[in-house]
Amino acid sequence: MKPIALSIAMLALCLSACDAQTPAPPAKPEAPAMPSTTEPAAPEAPEAPEAPREGLVGADRDEHGCIGSAGYRWCAKTQQCERPWELAEAEGFENTPEAFKAFCEG
């Protein structure tokens, strides 16, 4: 009987420790007080233009749809995007840009 009671007590202790607490929402910043004078407000400085965003990785497709950043290049002989080192191993030619060009364009 004691092992069962001890097991139940341990289970209750473990489950009560897992109480899901939701974090409080972040406090909203207070709105700045409006000036009570009738003078016009000073013009705000223009915002700096946003820095150009980098494109997504892998979004550099060429005219055939080959993703250059992933190592793919168009091969006219196979009519598909190929990774030069994989094609060189599969077809048995040297893994050089010249050999890839000779195989795919020649």
Image (spheres, rainbow, N blue to C red):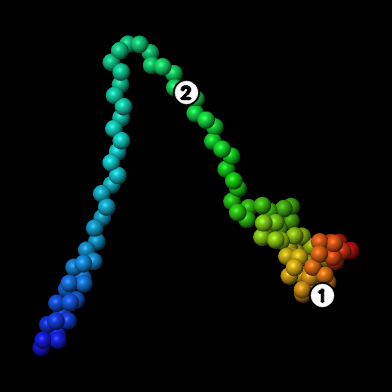
Position of residue 33 relative to residue 71, above or below, is: above
Mark 2 is on which residue type?
Ala
Distance Cα–Cα, label 1 vs label 2: 64 Å
Residue 88 appears in which quarter of the rendering? bottom right
How many discs appear?
2
Q: Is residue 20 left or right of residue 59?
A: left
Position of residue 87 relative to residue 101, above or below, is: below
* Residue 76 in sight in this render: no
Residue 18 appears in which quarter of the rendering? bottom left
> Regarding mark 1 in the picture, which secondary structure is present there?
loop
Q: Is residue 87 left or right of residue 34?
A: right
Residue lying at the far left in this picture: please name it: 1
Residue lying at the far right in this picture: please name it: 106
Residue 57 appears in which quarter of the rendering? bottom right
Residue annotated with mark 1: 92
Disc on the earlier residue, 1 or 2: 2
Q: Is residue 64 left or right of residue 8?
A: right
Which quadrant does the C terminus fall into?
bottom right
Residue annotated with mark 2: 45
Q: Are marks 1 and 2 in contact (CB under 8 Å)?
A: no
Q: Position of residue 62 (x, y in %)?
A: 72, 53
Q: Residues within 10 Å of mark 2 (few under 14, many from 20)?
A: few
